[in-house]
Image (tube, helix red, strand yellow):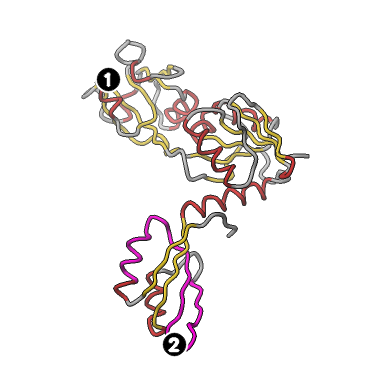
Amino acid sequence: MALRVAVPNKGTLSETAVQMLREAGYATRRDPKELIVADARNDVEFFYLRPRDIATYVGSGALDVGVTGRDLLLDSGSRASEVAELDFGASTFRFAGPVGRFRELGDLQGSRVATSYDGLVGDYLRRQGVDAEVVRLDGAVESAVRLGVADAVADVVETGGTLKAQGLEIFGPVILESVGVLIARDPAAPGLATFRRRLDGVMVAHQWVLMDYDLPAALVERAAAVTPGFESPTLSPLRGSDWVAVRVMVRRTETNELMDRLYELGARAILVTSIHAARI
């Protein structure tokens, strides 16, 4: 039986999720109106669903696996669980209210809090011992205070500019650091291990690159301290020389700094190559 996978059909998670699946070698939809894509070669079926519904479908057992946000999973109350964190869709949830009105979480006692994530926020407030009314809105919660629907809001915060434009300021602790996640009801579902391994390989390719350089053999230990690699560097002797060729995986974000440090150490012919796919 094919592995049944739920994929966001729209929103901030959708485009990146589909690109990741494509890079992992899976068939993806060509028409935004397609709801189901059967990938017979890989024995997988993809179902394109509303992001907010994915955790419910997976938790009910109707589908095996889903790509969604941690915030949506926790908000849903679904029986699905997170099996892997993905490297996209990061967001932060915070409380915000009129400037100067709220300073700490306890100030919300007896207040009304508007949010699109009533399950998530309501559970958080209960665990913190704060008795507040949670007002569910489908979107644009920033306007809720100005329109008199709520006293404060709880929402995704990036720069805070949208909240500030509505006369609101952030206060209190972080409610949740969310990110894209892979979820399942049964972590041992047939085919899930391979599916997860492929996505892991894509994330490795996104986050790491291959670095090759030549180096006097006497400096290998010092160079290894600079570039220890994913596991350890690979060394190859250069013919008729006391130099060696080194190949190592390094984090993509650190590439130029490491090249500078290696060059100062004495390395030459430093080359960097992107990784197309990986299995670690």
Residue type pointed to by label 1: Gln
Magenta span includes 14: no
Furthest-top residue in view? Answer: 148
Q: Residue at x 61, y 32 (%)?
A: 30
As displayed, is residue 219 above or below residue 48?
A: below
The percent coordinates of residue 136 (x first, y second) are 45, 17
Of residues 236 and 190, the one nearer the viewer is 236
Furthest-right residue in view? Answer: 1
Of residues 132 and 88, the one nearer the viewer is 88
* SS of the residue under disc 2: loop
Would residue 139 appear left or right of 201 to someone viewing this image?
A: left
Circle 1 residue = 166
Magenta span includes 254: yes
Disc 2, disc 1: CB below 8 Å? no
**Range covered by the magenta-colored residues:** 233-262
The percent coordinates of residue 44 (x first, y second) are 70, 40
As displayed, is residue 150 above or below residue 264?
A: above
As displayed, is residue 53 above or below residue 243?
A: above
Q: Label 2 neighbourhood size at 10 Å, few (<14), some (14-19), many (20+)?
A: few
